[in-house]
Amino acid sequence: MFLYNITVGIDKAVEIEWLAWVKNNYLPAILATGYFLDSKLYKIVMQDDEQSVSYSIQLFTDKIEKVVEYLDTHTATIIEMHRQQFKDRHVIFNTLLEEV
């Protein structure tokens, strides 16, 4: 099993709006691609930044090739959707993990 993790730091001023948008738009758009079997969303509870809050968006798949193909064919559109909605109000970094 593979976990594609998207960690997002979002300004506290737009946290509630962002969270609703992720649940209602962002995650459904990612899952609709068919590359991932399941998703989870976690709030990171231990952090030092007073201006932002961080979340972990976790996407699960059974083959690394699905992640590679998703990145090649869909991330530009989905990332741009996120940028347009929350321009200059977030930072993102991604991690790919393999279950052992």
Image (spheres, rainbow, N blue to C red):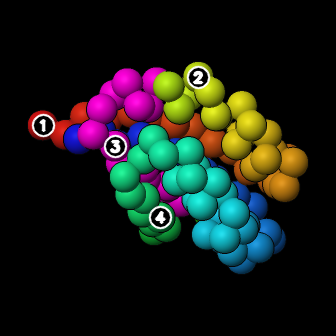
Above or below: residue 21 compared with residue 2: below
Residue 83 appears in view: yes
- Disc 4 + disc 2, Cβ < 8 Å: no
Q: In the rendered structure, are the residues bearing label 3 and label 1 in contact, judged by CB atoms less than 8 Å apart?
A: no
- Residue at image position (82%, 54%) is 86
- Residue 72 is tagged as 2
Q: What residue type is labelled 4?
A: Leu
- What is the C-alpha distance between the residues marked 4 and 2? 23 Å
* Residue ID at (64%, 54%): 29
Three-letter amino acid code at the position of disc 3: Thr
- The magenta stretch is 54-68
Give the CA separation, mark 3 to mark 2.
Answer: 16 Å
Residue at numbered disc 1: 100
Q: Which mark is residue 11?
A: none
Amino acid type of disc 1?
Val
Labels 1 and 4: the sequence-earlier one = 4
Q: In this view, does 44 lie to the left or right of 52?
A: left
Q: Is mark 3 on a helix, strand or loop?
A: strand
Instruction: Specify whether 7 is left or right of 63.
Output: right
Residue 65 occupies quadrant: top left
Secondary structure state at the residue bearing disc 1: loop
Q: Residues within 10 Å of mark 4 (few under 14, many from 20)?
A: some
The residue that label 3 is drawn on is 61
Indicate whether 67 appears above or below 29.
above
| Above or below, 58 relative to 96 | below
Whether pointer 1 and pointer 4 mark residues with C-beta atoms closer than 8 Å, the reply is no
Residue 41's tag is 4
In the rendered image, residue 21, in percent from the top left (x then y), is placed at 72, 68
Q: First in sequence, mark 3 or 2: give its number.
A: 3
For numbered disc 2, what is the local secondary structure? helix
Label 1: how many residues lie within 10 Å, few (<14), some (14-19) or many (20+)? Answer: few
| Residue drawn at 48 percent across, 46 percent down | 34
